[in-house]
Image (cartoon, rainbow, N blue to C red):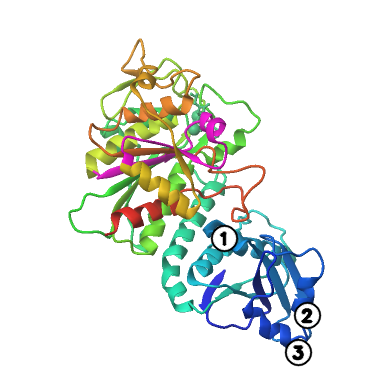
Amino acid sequence: MKITFAEQADAEIAAFVVDEDGGLPPAAKALDEATGGLLSEALSQDRFTGKHGQQETVVLPKSAPSRRAVLIGGGKLNERDARAQEKIGALLFKQQGGSGFKTMALHVDDAAFANRAAIGAELASYRFDQFFTKLKDDQKPSLEALTLVTSEADAAKADWGHYEAATEGTKLARDLMNLPPNVLYPETFAKRIKELEEFGLEVEILDEDDMEKLGMGALLGVGQGSRRESRLAIMKWMGGKDGDAPVALCGKGVCFDAGGISIKPGPGMEDMRGDMGGAAAVTGAMLSLAKRKAKANVVGLVGLVENMPDGNAIKPSDILTSASGQTIEVQNTDAEGRLVLADVLWYAQQHFKPQSIVDLATLTGAIVISLGHHHAGLFTNDDGVADGLTKAGLTEGERVWRLPLGSEYDSLLKSKFADMRNIGGRAAGSITAAQFLKRFVNEGQKWAHIDIAGVAWVDGEKSPLDPSWASGFGPRLLDRWIADNYEG
Ligand code: BES
Ligand code: ZN
Ligand code: ZN
């Protein structure tokens, strides 16, 4: 959608925010007078109280400058935080996006509200409809342009570049997630990443031979049961000072997780096309950083595989040798994400000596039981990183909640046959998964792991900012964290 900021604007739909139990906002007064009080009348009738998200549409006479006026409830002023502002933009799009009109002007108080409402409308307007061949025009949104009208239009415009880049990242992550696994598999995912060079990222793709030479037996072990070849994609954005160690973002990119020989039950297996949500988040974040020309050095590394059962697949009791040299007894081939990340984490440290690492992965079903769909699980060996990520998540509405690590959990990974096994038993499944990853993190290396299995897609009640299957969780969080912590 085309987003603009202006001090005044003509549009087919004129939208105004009404405080809960408040009167008509000053911005609506002129239109109200020009229409003989139609807006005040709408406000005094019906059940419209200005409760957050309520909408009242007023048909305007031909003589008026707009075709429709929309009053949208802003809720109580003291409760109107960034999330509430974003939702106002999103709910307006949801209700008016298919109204047949092409242009809308939303009147808001200040630059921050303008940007938040724009983010909301932009994310709510996301669609993934490329596989519908019979869509008629009236089944597609009509709204093409939104102008945020505010006296702080210049300030809003100045900030939008950053926010817009972040929403581009979210939308890319959604696209990658929503694509079916016969279209998006390791090779095609890597190809799409390569195409991001257009935006100034430097991209390197390792194939199976390259990874074989590096001894990546854990990642390759997962991929060996698939007809599709595995890939490791490395994206670089060096917008910071020359010689500054980069931040590394690592992602689990299991393009389909059938479970392997420890095959998953049929019902719900289709969701496992989203098991590359960590890789999608990292790719989206790298695009955001490039689009806004972030002043930071950041590398993104995603391990791309398919976890399938076939005659060549790894079996429970196989022992794999990871690139770090550590051996792993595979007790459950469905605990594959940690195997992939083990080698990705090793590569990130070996090649980039990063100042900090964040990995993202749809790693465990257990995190969905712990935190549901409203927080991702955060595990880290560094309190500063924990604070930074927690704050960034609150700022952008992609929340994380810290869970513990500890040697007692690590002991659950002991194996009779190898350095470790790849599962820890039923108890504390998300923590033992994080402990497994920690075994591949060098002493003294700052590192965080974010388990996004509960937030990468949400069935049931969803936010109006999240209209497709995939939420696109991650780019906004990572982009904000980097902006606030690594860009002077
Ligand atoms: N990709 C799954 C985790 C998952 C589950 C993501 C549900 C999203 C929704 C992961 O590879 C997996 O299968 N984990 C197992 C680990 C177990 C075998 C120790 C799990 O969570 O059941
Ligand atoms: Zn699995
Ligand atoms: Zn998985």
Number of disc labels: 3
Task: Reply above or below: 324 against 300.
Answer: above
Q: Label 2 to label 1, Cα distance in Å?
A: 28 Å
Q: Residue at x 37, y 32 (%)?
A: 219
Q: Residue at x 29, y 58 (%)?
A: 487
| Quadrant including the C terminus | bottom left
Residue 12 position within the rendered picture, expressed as x and y whole percent measured from the top left: 68, 79
Q: Residue at x 35, y 57 (%)?
A: 483
Residue 42 position within the rendered picture, expressed as x and y whole percent measured from the top left: 78, 73
Residue type at mark 1 is: Asn
Q: Label 2 to label 3, Cα distance in Å?
A: 13 Å
Magenta segment includes 211: no
Magenta region: which residues?
Answer: 354-383
Residue 328 position within the rendered picture, expressed as x and y whole percent measured from the top left: 35, 21
Bin the neighbour count of mark 2 within 10 Å (Cα to Cα): few under 14, some 14-19, many 20 and up: some
Q: Label 1 to label 3, Cα distance in Å?
A: 37 Å
Dot 1 falls on a residue whose secondary structure is: helix
**Among all residues in the image, which is located at the extreme left?**
243
The yes-or-no answer for disc 3 within 8 Å of ligand 1 is no
Residue picked out by circle 1: 78
Residue type at mark 3 is: Ser
Residue 241 position within the rendered picture, expressed as x and y whole percent measured from the top left: 21, 59
Residue 349 appears in view: yes
Residue picked out by circle 3: 63
| The one of 376 and 453 positioned closer to us in this rendering | 376
Dot 3 falls on a residue whose secondary structure is: loop
Magenta segment includes 359: yes
Task: Reply above or below: 195 against 60.
Answer: above
Dot 2 falls on a residue whose secondary structure is: helix
Bin the neighbour count of mark 3 within 10 Å (Cα to Cα): few under 14, some 14-19, many 20 and up: few
